[in-house]
Image (cartoon, rainbow, N blue to C red):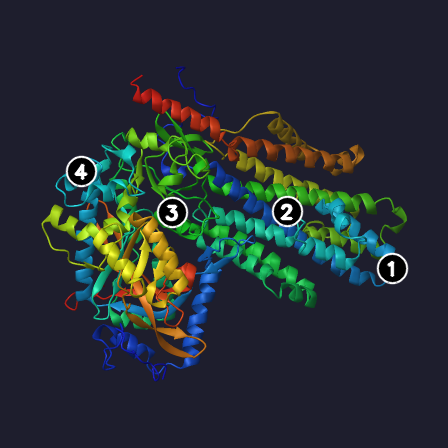
């Protein structure tokens, strides 16, 4: 009989010296990551919708075409334009907001994001504080409630405010009740990854649309639009305090890409991702092409000005940034959070052989 | 006010004597509830339910694609046990678990109790959960049953009887702890006045019991790595698994998180494979290791049994304890106590007839309409015939089943379970409902019984079925301090 050979298993047996408290299951790391990421997504979408509904009120009557032009970029910044048209013939306010808030078949609807965050939390309830769990559970119950739709129709703003409040409450509680162990890094990693993605998308989509209309620059509508971009990223007040000047497209781009103090700028998010990278696994910073690309992007942000970036093409720049961050996410996920499932059949065969050999005294 | 139409109706009532007097151990509860308005009590009841929903203290309803979660219905009127009563229960349970553990060791080694013809060998060897492949298997410190949840009932005279032993993966301890937390918020003053013993130590005791049985192969410091193995988030008891793991501060793992190499168990972490020493498993034997038991189990860990056999990991409870849950074996427990300990049982069992024995079988078949018939290996209130309440067809159905497979059935006279005042929202008042009691016993360095337990209540009027799957709820269980003992500062 051939000696039993073990199916391959990645990773080597760690020394027993690691105290149990610092050990983190890969599955748990994954759940913490998705919990952080989905809740951040829910918050961003809630804010995006709220801002754009309010913006429409400012516009007054703009006709069907105007409304469509208004909503398409919103769908695009969530990355769900294609999916939307599988369910709705035209992009009007009711359809888009319904789709992005409640639609069961839209994985990125606020409803599903909160549900996914909560489901991931449920899988690691033993790892997070009771307070964190309760907020997620409450958010989930709020959206599941029979009257949720009615509450939303009666006052979308109050509704989205509530969603954002759940996210803020969760972050505050995480900050004050969750130990700064490895698990913290996965929550943060998920959160800042999502933020970097959303900030760049919102800026990209709007910049793309607004900038060619040079004649409008400085007009009331244009200012309202740029304000909306800032508000969609919670950046309006921070922008004003920083520049103490009117809202200019170039400065908006500068702020959202390069600010080193505003916690939603691309640069800030990448710095946070970098911090987390240093604390995952055993503390040895992961390596590989995806990490090299990320390092290059981050180094560029420390060096470049917004003029450099725009000269090179803002759209291309943001597009590349999204791709680099996306590849980093995949690489980190595969390295720490995902063990390929064992092939059960070969695993069973292996142990049965081992058993037989043992019984035969081999 | 809330009690003015309350009647004991000839049942043994936990709170009131037949004359309508409040039993002494219920004085604080009676004082607390007296003068309370219906609306006020209803308000407390709703507040507790809301807190459970918010806290996600729920179980998953099976066969529901939306994964509906429900709270385990909770009744705010606490069940109270006096110090004297508890003393008997505690001693009785310790005696019983000691004997059952000795029995398990015996039947998996020398089988003296069979050789001495105290128990017919066929009764053990034919038991569905008897694991022949574990003969002569050494378990650390000879402990097979680390956690036991024994179901007790009280009959018409208030006598405590053992209804069944749960030696595999008894559940419900988390509800015991959550129920207490809820009552603490709803009736803090009543709780203080009554002088109730705390239950919160359960998780720490459980952890100590787990650490105590580190495998012989363990060569580390004093802190062996203990994990809780769950079937996963879709299991109806997942809340409990997560709750206990959190309270113990140990990782909760699924089968896919573990891997066996060189007869040792490892968990898959962000730092690679990390060794595991003790597994508090909440997966039944059958699903534990697809390389030994059911090959179609996706919940288990291939090689786990071999690792346990090699002495590199301890499973709690041990493999093969289910044989003692068999209702035929239940019948023999008083004899075991006598045989192994030389003592008389402190807690009585329910009179039991074995369909496998010709004389008993004839009696059962003749009296199906007067008896409760149970399958030897079912739990959760399934596989039962309640003779006095059954239709003629059900009785015929069971008669055929019993004759076809007598080994699989026992019968008992119906016990009129004790009743307890329970809130009935529709009436805005209390009414008597039948209850049982599941205390939790831990076997570590010594055997301890948590002072409390899960009181389950049949919420439907007249019903004797307390299982949560069939309209049952639960109550907080108060064990009072002995009168002499000063309350803890």
Give the residue at the far left of this rendering.
B342
> Marks 4 and 1, how far apart in space?
89 Å
- In contact (CB < 8 Å): disc 2 and disc 3: no
> Marks 4 and 3, how far apart in space?
36 Å
What chain does badge 1 belong to?
A
| A232 or B377: nearer the viewer | B377
| Tag shown at residue B245 | 3
Residue B428 locus on image (x, y percent):
43, 79
Both marks 2 and 3 on one chain: no
**Label 3 element class:** helix
Vertical arrangement, residue B271 with respect to residue A190, above or below: above
**Label 2 element class:** loop
**Label 4 element class:** loop
| Tag shown at residue B111 | 4
User: Which of pointers 2 and 4 indicates the residue nearer the eye?
Assistant: 4
Of the two numbered discs 2 and 1 on the same chain, state the one appearing first in sequence.
Answer: 1
Identify the residue under disc 1. Answer: A63
| Tag shown at residue A262 | 2
Label 1 crowd (10 A; few <14 / some 14-19 / many >=20): few
């Amino acid at each position: 009989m051939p000696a039993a050979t073990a199916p391959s298993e990645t990773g080597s047996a760690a020394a027993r010296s690691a105290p149990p408290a610092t050990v983190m299951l890969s599955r748990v790391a994954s759940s913490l990551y998705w919990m952080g990421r989905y809740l951040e997504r829910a918050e961003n979408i809630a804010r995006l919708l709220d801002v754009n509904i309010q913006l429409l009120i400012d516009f007054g009557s703009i006709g069907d075409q105007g409304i469509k032009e208004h909503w398409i970029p919103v769908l695009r910044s969530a990355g769900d334009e294609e999916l939307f048209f599988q369910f709705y013939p035209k992009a009007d306010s009711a359809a888009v907001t319904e789709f992005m808030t409640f639609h069961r078949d839209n994985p990125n609807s606020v409803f599903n994001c909160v549900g996914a965050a909560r489901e991931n939390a449920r899988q690691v309830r033993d790892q997070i504080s009771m307070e964190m769990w309760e907020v997620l559970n409450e958010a989930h119950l709020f959206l599941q409630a029979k009257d949720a739709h009615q509450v939303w129709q009666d006052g979308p703003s109050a509704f989205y405010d509530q969603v954002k409040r759940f996210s803020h409450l969760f972050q505050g509680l995480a900050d004050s009740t969750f130990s700064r162990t490895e698990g913290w890094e996965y929550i943060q990693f998920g959160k800042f990854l999502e933020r970097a993605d959303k900030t760049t998308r919102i800026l990209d989509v709007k910049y793309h649309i607004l900038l060619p209309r040079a004649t409008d620059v400085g007009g009331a509508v244009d200012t309202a639009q740029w304000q909306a971009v800032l508000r969609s990223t919670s950046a309006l007040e921070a922008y004003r305090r920083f520049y103490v000047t009117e809202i200019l497209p170039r400065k908006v781009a500068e702020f959202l890409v390069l600010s080193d103090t505003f916690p939603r700028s691309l640069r800030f998010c990448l710095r946070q991702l970098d911090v987390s990278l240093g604390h995952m696994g055993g503390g040895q910073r992961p390596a590989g092409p995806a990490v090299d690309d990320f390092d290059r992007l981050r180094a560029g942000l420390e060096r470049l000005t917004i003029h450099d970036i725009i000269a090179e093409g803002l759209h291309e720049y943001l597009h590349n940034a999204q791709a680099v961050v996306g590849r980093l996410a995949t690489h980190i996920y595969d390295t720490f959070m995902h063990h390929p499932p064992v092939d059960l059949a070969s695993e069973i065969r292996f142990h049965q052989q081992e058993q037989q050999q043992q019984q035969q005294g081999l | 006010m809330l009690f003015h139409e309350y009647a004991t109706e000839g049942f043994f009532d936990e709170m009131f004597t037949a004359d309508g007097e409040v039993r002494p151990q219920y004085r604080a509860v009676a004082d607390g509830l007296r003068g309370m308005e219906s609306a006020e009590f209803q308000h407390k009841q709703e507040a507790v339910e809301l807190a459970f929903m918010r806290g996600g203290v729920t179980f998953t309803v099976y066969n529901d694609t939306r994964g509906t979660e429900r709270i385990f219905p909770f009744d705010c009127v606490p069940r109270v046990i006096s110090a004297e009563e508890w003393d008997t229960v505690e001693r009785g349970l310790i005696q019983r678990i000691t004997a059952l553990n000795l029995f398990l060791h015996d039947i998996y080694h020398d089988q003296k109790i069979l050789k001495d013809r105290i128990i017919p060998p066929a009764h053990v060897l034919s038991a569905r959960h008897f694991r022949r492949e574990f003969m002569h298997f050494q378990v650390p410190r000879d402990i097979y049953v680390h956690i036991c949840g024994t179901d007790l009932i009280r009959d018409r005279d208030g006598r405590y009887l053992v209804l069944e032993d749960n030696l595999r993966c008894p559940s419900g301890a988390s509800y015991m702890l959550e129920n207490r937390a809820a009552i603490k918020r709803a009736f803090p003053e009543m709780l203080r006045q009554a002088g109730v013993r705390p239950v919160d130590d359960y998780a720490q005791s459980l952890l100590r019991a787990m650490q105590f049985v580190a495998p012989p192969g363990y060569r580390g410091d004093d802190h062996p790595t203990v994990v809780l193995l769950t079937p996963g988030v879709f299991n109806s008891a997942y809340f409990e698994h997560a709750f206990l793991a959190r309270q113990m501060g140990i990782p909760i793992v699924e089968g896919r998180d573990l891997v066996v190499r060189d007869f040792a168990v490892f968990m898959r972490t962000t730092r690679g494979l990390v060794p595991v020493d003790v597994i508090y498993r909440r997966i039944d034997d059958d699903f534990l290791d697809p390389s030994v038991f059911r090959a179609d189990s996706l919940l288990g860990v291939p090689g786990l049994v071999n690792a346990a056999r090699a002495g590199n990991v301890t499973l709690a409870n041990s493999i093969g304890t289910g044989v003692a849950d068999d209702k035929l074996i239940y019948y023999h427990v008083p004899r075991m106590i006598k045989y192994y300990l030389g003592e008389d049982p402190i807690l009585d069992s329910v009179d039991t007839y074995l369909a496998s024995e010709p004389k008993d079988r004839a009696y059962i078949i003749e009296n199906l309409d007067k008896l409760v018939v149970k399958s030897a290996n079912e739990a959760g209130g399934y596989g039962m015939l309640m003779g006095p309440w059954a239709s003629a067809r059900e009785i015929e159905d069971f008669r055929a089943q019993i004759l076809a497979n007598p080994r699989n059935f026992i019968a008992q006279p119906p016990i009129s379970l004790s009743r307890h005042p329970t809130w009935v929202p529709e009436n805005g008042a209390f009414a008597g409902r039948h209850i049982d009691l599941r205390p939790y016993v831990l076997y570590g360095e010594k055997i301890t019984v948590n002072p409390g337990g899960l009181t389950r209540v049949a919420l439907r009027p007249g019903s004797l079925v307390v299982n949560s799957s069939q309209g049952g709820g639960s109550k907080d269980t108060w064990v009072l301090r002995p009168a002499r003992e000063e309350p803890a500062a």
